[in-house]
Image (cartoon, rainbow, N blue to C red):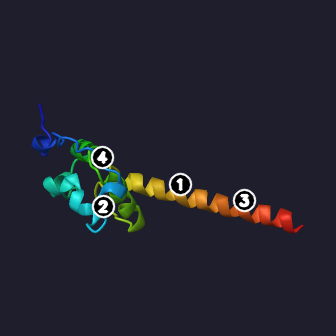
Amino acid sequence: MLQSPHSSLQVAAVPAPRVPARERDQDAPWHTEAVCRRDEAGLFFAPSKEPTAARLSREEAAKRVCSGCPVMVECREHALLQPEPYGVWGGLTAAERRVVLARRRRREMELKKTARASANRMAG
């Protein structure tokens, strides 16, 4: 049986209890509490010419680490606002982040369109 090159890394860290942002130290940057700081960066970023099966396995392992992270939401928003073009951030791959960003853009355009239509009705 073939093993993923990251098979030893696929055991997710024990999930840390989620701490609401308001209870965390507001002076410390969010990434100081990131669970992935304890993991190998190779789990979150693809090596060159990685086979598809290995990539999918590695990404799932990274997502498992993210799922137990107390700053997953902050990490995801960082990756969406930057935008980070590579790697797993906040439990999303680069392709998944592109989908989220496209949906957000569509939603913003729909809201603007609705607001203009409403303003035109009120003015007319």
| Name of the residue lying farthest toward the front | 23
Is 84 on the left or on the right of 118, as rendered? Answer: left
Bin the neighbour count of mark 3 within 10 Å (Cα to Cα): few under 14, some 14-19, many 20 and up: few
Q: Which residue is mark 2?
A: 86
Question: Which of the 4 quarters of the picture holds residue 46?
Answer: bottom left
Picture quarter with the N terminus:
top left
Q: Nearer the viewer, mark 2 or mark 3?
A: 3
Is 40 on the left or on the right of 100, as rendered? Answer: left
Please state which amino acid type lies under the numbered disc 3: Thr
Q: Is residue 82 above or below residue 4?
A: below
Bin the neighbour count of mark 2 within 10 Å (Cα to Cα): few under 14, some 14-19, many 20 and up: some
- Of mark 1 and mark 2, the one earlier in the sequence is 2
| Name of the residue lying farthest toward the right | 124
C-alpha separation, residue under disc 1 versus residue under disc 2? 19 Å
C-alpha separation, residue under disc 2 versus residue under disc 3? 34 Å
Question: Which of the 4 quarters of the picture holds residue 23?
Answer: bottom left
Q: Position of residue 14 (x, y in %)?
A: 18, 40
Please state which amino acid type lies under the numbered disc 4: Arg
Q: Which residue is mark 3?
A: 114
Query: Under tag 4, what secondary structure?
Result: loop
Q: In the rendered structure, find residue 18 and report the number of the disc placed on it.
A: 4
